[in-house]
Image: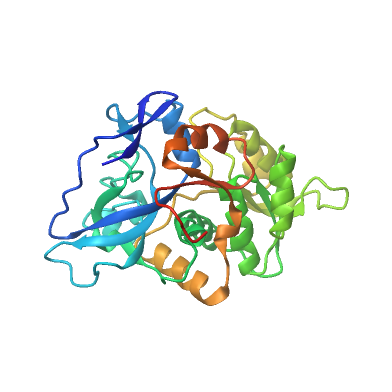
Amino acid sequence: MRAVALRSPGQVTVLEDWPEPTGGPEDVVVAVRGVGVCGSDLSVVRGHRRVPRMPWVLGHEAMGEVIAVGGSVADRHVGQRVVIEPNYACLNCPRCRVGATATCSRRRIPGMSEPGLLAERIAVPARFSWPVPADWCDDDVICIEPLAVAMSAVARSGATSGQQALVIGAGAQGLLVVLALLRVGVEPYVVDPQPGRMALAGELGGHDGDALDAPEGFRLIFETAGVPAALELAMAKALPDAHLALIGQCMTPVPLSTFELVRRRLTLQGCLIYDHPEGFAATIAAVKSENLEPGRVVRAHFSMNQAAQAFRAAAAAPGKSCITLTEGQNT
């Protein structure tokens, strides 16, 4: 079986002999059709985020069809189209029991704490595979997971219709935050140094946050870039009583003045993924009923043999990149 793996930092290759998955009684085996490229994947590829061993199978934003069902699974069937929720919370610890599964200390993360999903076939816990309509295009399905991140952050921020918000960073996650804000009636302004990304943000309904007629400050800010300069900009653009939702992650310490936080009564909120099962359930329901078409952010498709190119290009390319594992996909 073929899989895309990291052999060493920066070296992505296709393995031809990756072992076939063996599903347990509560698992399903999925034939993967496509996998989205995410910023956290790029951190692994560059060696900024350490993984347990090499070679290391990459990827976590996967979708495909069920080809085998464990003996204890009653609500999935062969041939069913599914998207994977790639954060397997234990569901038994104190954090999980209060619904905060995103902060589960035993959470398993494909592509990070265990081999990823960028393989021809994968075994996943059935409860973390979500059926989706057969007529949805693959790009929409691949974007369910990062859209769930965006919708969760918007919901946690308390955003309400009629507000204006600043989105810092127009990478794929920032673009999906734009869509998530628009669906709740918030007017998004976007800043990003790359003209191509800004053009795509405008196409999706975002305004240029650097335009002459843009607001000078905001009471709602979403930082999606995950670089120190982005948090500095968020602080500079925050009005008194502003809420700063932090989605991007960075290991570099950032100077932060508590004097400014207190003086302007600012709220900083870390927005880590989503909670199970509400996050995915709400996202799939919204895509079904509201014609969101999150796949609009996908602008590049690569074959499995082009995986190394996909990871090299994704950091700078406008829109989201995806790696397809089968021919003739409905994109």
Camera-side residue of 122 and 222: 122
Would you identify the image quadrant in which residue 49 lies? Answer: top left
Point out residue 250 in the picture as x, y percentages from the top left corner: 51, 34
Name which residue lies at 16% across and 49% down.
22
Residue nearest the observer in this picture, 295 or 108: 295
- Where's residue 150, x and y in %? 53, 56
Place residue 14 in its image quadrant.
top left
Q: Residue furthest bottom?
A: 289
Q: Is residue 148 left or right of residue 198?
A: left
Residue 127 x/y as whole percent: 26, 63
- Residue 321 as seen in the image, left or right of residue 277: right
Percent x, y of residue 318: 64, 44
**Residue farthest toward the front in the current orientation of the protein:** 328
Left or right, 331 with respect to 215, comes to left
Q: Nearer the viewer, residue 161 or 29?
A: 29
Q: Residue at x 17, y 67 (%)?
A: 73
Q: Give residue 207's quadrant in the image.
A: bottom right
Depth check: give the residue in front, 79 or 132: 79
Which residue is at 30% across, 40% downward?
2
Q: Is residue 238 visible?
A: no
Q: How many numbered marks, from 0 up?
A: 0
Point 34% across, 51% down: residue: 87
